[in-house]
Amino acid sequence: MRHIISIREFEKEEIDALLDSAGTIDAGRYDRTALADRILGVLFFEPSTRTRMSFEAAMARLGGRSIDMGGVEASSVSKGETLADTIRVVSGYADAIVLRHPREGAARLAAEFSSVPVLNAGDGAGQHPSQTLIDLYTIRQAMPLDGIDVGLLGDLRYGRTAHSLAYALAEYNATIHTLAPGSLEMPQNVIEGLRDAGVEVVVHTDITEFAHTLDVMYVTRIQRERFPDTASYYAVASSYRVTPELLEGVRERMIVLHPLPRVDEIDSRVDTLPHARYFEQARNGIPIRMALLMEVMG
Amino acid sequence: MTGNRRTLQISPIRNGTVIDHITAGEAFNVLRILGITGTTHEILSIATNVASGKAGKKDIVKIENRELCKEEVDRIALIAPNATINIIRDYLVFDKKGVEIPDVLYGVIRCPNPGCITNTNEPVRSRFEVTAKGLHCTYCEWYLTEDIAGHII
């Protein structure tokens, strides 16, 4: 039985194999009844649109079904049930569990109590391995993954997707460039971990300094709810904004990614430029999650 | 002469545990992590900043009528890695062992990350790997690198 908890548990060869598998699925070559007798337990303890819907859609496209605990307020969680007990119960109903939880480490705990595979769909500021695979898949559609220059912009302190992507890219000898507003810099232990893994990490303070050197510009949302007031939010939010003007002079193959939802960190005029790949990135959630479901239940 | 002074500073015990070679200044933290406070009933002898040939200065704690278990020794190892544990029975050293930080600590450290799942009412003990970079929470992947004594449960 295999759980999918963290991208750091994958060897490079495994990542490549999963991306290959997603590519095959993307080309329409897959068994539409592969999971016909299987049930996916969908446990989302916090809001999500793309992750939840794409897991359910992926399961449906493989002929399987999903069961959903509904919102937290409608479940036994509101009565004080522990996650461990919820997992023990649902693993008796389903053949795999996909879990989104606000606490870091929740997926690893769930795996300890589950009798079926657990797929981490995001645990707090921790891990979100399927999103990282989607990011890698989208990059690989545009260019080889080896030796690229990747800029990470936005909330790099709490941004789990940026951390996971950086760690995964360490396997591909990437150079990581970071740009974050004052209080949201990438944690020093993450930077040290990346450097220990052989990644060159360059910390920037102005996006115009390095935008033209990038192959991938990975933009994340600054979470307004983390700031005490609107003014302090805008003070940091305005420290970067991706506009058509900024993208003049960037590498021709450079792509802009964003795990979405975005607020105003990417100008909507960018959407029609060839660099914009964030909607393809969201769509790629289906083949990647189909590949993962096949990996744990196929 | 120096040896006689030490004998006067901290007298022998009949049964119990002598924790020697504690890092100077850590004796009270050792007591805290053993759950020994001013309101508990152990008979204690404590010497701090005693001259030591190896470390210059050290602390010593003697606890009468109590033998430490492995988990307690693990905790002491985190803040006093050079300590030695002497189990005393009828004034004689029955067992003598150095402390050794284990590869994994179960239920010893409280994770400093307030968002970690182990800081809730879930039925799990904290779990930390001991790494060169610090203590690594295997649930939330945070590293604890300082004030380890302050996070001992």
Image (cartoon, coloured by chain):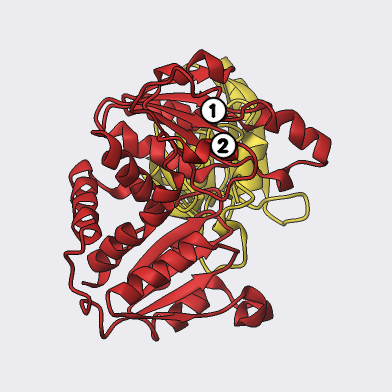
The subunit carrying tag 2 is A
- Depth order, front residue of A161/A3: A161
- Depth order, front residue of B145/A195: A195
Q: Which colour is chain B painted?
A: yellow
Q: Are discs 2 and 1 both within one chain?
A: yes
Within 10 angstroms of label 2, few (less than 14), some, or many (20 or more) residues? few
Which amino acid does the dot numbered 2 rest on? Arg
Q: In which quarter of the image is the N terminus of chain A?
A: bottom left
The subunit carrying tag 1 is A
Please, is residue A62 above or below residue A129 in the view?
Answer: below
- In three-dimensional space, the C-alpha distance between marks 2 and 1, rounded to whole angstroms, equals 7 Å
Which amino acid does the dot numbered 1 rest on? Pro
Q: Earlier in the sequence, mark 2 or mark 1?
A: 1
Residue B35, percent across and down? 65, 53
> Is disc 1 placed on a helix, strand or loop?
loop
Observer able to see residue B9: no
Instruction: Identify the residue at image location x=52%, y=51%.
Output: B108
The disc label shown at residue A269, or none? 2
- Depth order, front residue of A133/A97: A133
Residue A244, percent across and down? 54, 28
Residue B143, percent across and down? 50, 38
> Is disc 2 placed on a helix, strand or loop?
helix
The disc label shown at residue B26, or none? none
The disc label shown at residue A244, or none? 1
- Depth order, front residue of A151/B132: A151
Left or right of residue A129, residue B9 in this image? right
Left or right of residue B84, residue A21 in this image? left
Q: Pointers 2 and 1 in contact (CB under 8 A)?
A: yes
Residue B4, percent across and down? 58, 22
Which chain comes out red in the rendered image?
Answer: A
